């Protein structure tokens, strides 16, 4: 049993590295593949081991993800929309490695903080959730209004929200397999890469400066990610990007260091909190948890403890892997053509979409890509593209 | 905070995790119950038994296996969800919940290892 779990953790981290480095290959896609292979896999492993594998892949991917999202400027999904901006700026100043280190500091401290905060968080979730349960739709609507009103160009922000919402409804109600894959790859992945092609980004030689980060900054950023991550985890349709916006309005700190740590923190905090919500609220808040609860007939407190321990181990190891990977990328990136690499990734994602979702998926990908480029031209936040999930969720509650 | 501090911290987190794993891993596996003890067990309890299949009854929706170990025998209900095949006198390990039926305890199987 112990050996089985340790081997699973190592295999999971390798898979996590693989899908972390292939932009567009989201852990949810990997989970779907693993689940569809489960009749075959369960001949060699117990459902519990397979569940452990899924958790390791998700945790390590969420940490390793900082490497492609900073060096390639191509966020995998909604989650890293926000880390691109300050991270990309640092990359263009030759401080890519430092940006990764900052994000990773957030991930590991966020992970540990969230694990330590489980008892109070569980209590708060149990007390607060029933109170807001009936008003969730209004909380969501107010959040959307708040997000739109903080933009200078409110009309376009609203327009983007509605357009992506309609696209989301059309995609989710279509008979597509894996509808989220072409939708998010288009909105957040390929659109960024295409704009990068147009802007002729040239990555300068990277310096390996030692980041000197004050403990106070780390503490502030991790605490913020714990608070905003917990709030967002109670609301369906909101993701890491919204948590990051909420977080930066709490700290009111435009310091890119603090922001990157927070973004890293939110990723892991949300994952740990999703364990609590499945145990206490019986609500699966992310794809990995959905997959795990499908595998295990009974979700007990012992499972929770095992999964938390596994998250800690794989989180710690992934940080070590990420530091190494970031160094490799730092020395490689200035040498290779960013344009060719982007083009290569765009073609890769397109082929993957055609294989997984067919030509209807390709149509969604093209539409989503076009829509995903508009915020950049209009100089508004890409978070409004999350309307593709938020609008269907809001309508589902209202109708 | 320096990069080397981060490295040490991450390493420490994974080592503490592995240590905790060593302690918890025994508790994750359900302990094996003797069949005799299940006859007095509380309803809805999660248990694990191991024994040989003494008898197989098949109905359209489920299998009823009579499983025997050194201490006694018990009926185990297995719902036909997947393609299942049982052979008499083979050894099985069953995880499931205890349920009372006509004054006798029986097991609703959740997981079967043949």
Image (spheres, coloured by chain):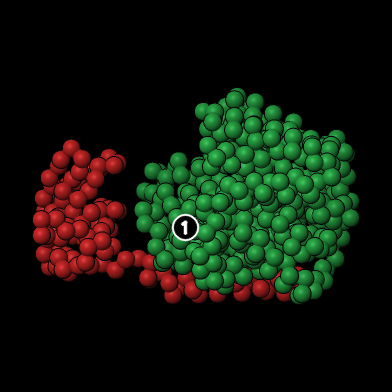
Chain colours: A green, B red
Q: Of residues A178 and A244, which is closer to you in this image?
A: A244
Mark 1 nearby-residue class (10 Å; few <14, some 14–19, many ≥20): some
| Res. A356 visible in picture | no
Q: Position of residue A70 (x, y in %)?
A: 76, 52
> Which residue is painted at 14% across and 55% down in the image?
B101
Q: Which quadrant would the N terminus of chain A be assigned to in this image?
A: bottom left
Left or right: residue A40 versus residue A146 is left
> Which residue is painted at 29% across and 41% down in the image?
B82
> Which residue is painted at 47% across and 70% down in the image?
B21
> Which residue is painted at 73% across and 70% down in the image?
A220
| Res. A123 visible in picture | yes
Q: Where is residue A180 in the image (x, y as percent from the top left)?
A: 59, 38
Corner quadrant of residue A389: top right
Residue picked out by circle 1: A281
Left or right: residue A14 versus residue A148 is left
Q: In this view, does B52 lie above or below B61?
A: below
Q: Of residues A275 and A386, which is closer to you in this image?
A: A386
Is disc 1 placed on a helix, strand or loop? helix
């Amino acid at each position: 049993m112990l050996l089985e779990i340790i081997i699973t953790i190592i295999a999971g981290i390798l898979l996590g590295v693989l899908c972390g480095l292939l932009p567009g290959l989201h852990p949810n896609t990997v989970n779907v593949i693993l689940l569809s292979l489960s009749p075959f896999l369960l001949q060699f492993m117990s459902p519990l081991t397979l569940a452990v594998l899924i958790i390791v892949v998700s945790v390590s991917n969420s940490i390793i993800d900082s490497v492609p999202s900073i060096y390639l400027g191509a966020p995998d999904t909604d989650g890293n929309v926000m880390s691109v901006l300050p991270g990309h700026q640092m990359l263009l100043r030759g401080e890519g490695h430092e940006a990764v280190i900052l994000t990773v500091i957030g991930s590991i401290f966020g992970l540990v903080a969230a694990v330590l905060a489980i008892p109070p968080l569980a209590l708060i979730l149990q007390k607060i959730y029933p109170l807001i349960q009936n008003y969730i739709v209004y909380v969501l609507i107010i959040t959307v209004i708040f997000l739109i009103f903080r933009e200078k160009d409110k009309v376009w922000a609203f327009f983007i929200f509605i357009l992506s919402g309609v696209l989301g409804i059309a995609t989710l109600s279509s008979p597509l397999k894996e509808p989220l894959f072409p939708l998010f790859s288009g909105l957040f992945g390929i659109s960024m890469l295409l704009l990068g092609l147009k802007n002729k980004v040239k990555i300068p030689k990277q310096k390996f400066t030692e980041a000197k980060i004050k403990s106070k900054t780390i503490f502030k950023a991790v605490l913020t990610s714990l608070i905003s991550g917990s709030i967002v985890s109670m609301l369906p349709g909101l993701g890491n990007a919204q948590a990051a916006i909420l977080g930066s309005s709490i700290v009111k700190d435009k310091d890119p260091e603090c922001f990157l740590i927070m973004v890293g923190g939110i990723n892991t905090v949300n994952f740990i909190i999703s364990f609590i919500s499945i145990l206490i609220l019986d609500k699966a808040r992310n794809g990995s948890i959905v997959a795990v609860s499908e595998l295990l007939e009974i979700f007990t407190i012992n499972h929770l403890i095992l999964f938390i321990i596994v998250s800690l181990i794989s989180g710690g190891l992934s940080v070590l892997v990420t530091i190494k990977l970031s160094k490799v990328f730092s020395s490689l990136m200035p040498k290779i053509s960013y344009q060719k690499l982007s083009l290569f990734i765009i073609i890769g994602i397109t082929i993957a979409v055609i294989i997984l979702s067919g030509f209807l998926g390709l149509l969604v990908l093209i539409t989503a890509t076009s829509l995903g480029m508009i915020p950049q031209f209009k100089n508004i936040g890409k978070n409004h593209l999350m309307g593709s999930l938020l609008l269907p969720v809001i309508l589902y509650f209202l109708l | 905070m320096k990069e080397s501090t981060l490295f040490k911290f991450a390493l420490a987190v994974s080592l503490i995790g592995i240590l905790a794993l060593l302690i918890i891993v025994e508790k994750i596996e359900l302990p094996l119950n003797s069949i005799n003890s299940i006859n007095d067990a509380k309803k809805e309890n999660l248990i694990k038994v191991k024994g040989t299949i003494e008898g197989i009854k098949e109905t359209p929706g489920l299998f009823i296996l009579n499983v025997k170990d050194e201490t006694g025998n018990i009926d185990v209900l297995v719902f036909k969800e997947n393609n299942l095949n049982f052979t008499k006198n083979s050894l099985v390990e069953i995880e499931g919940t205890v349920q009372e039926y006509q004054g006798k305890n029986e097991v609703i199987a959740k997981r079967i290892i043949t």
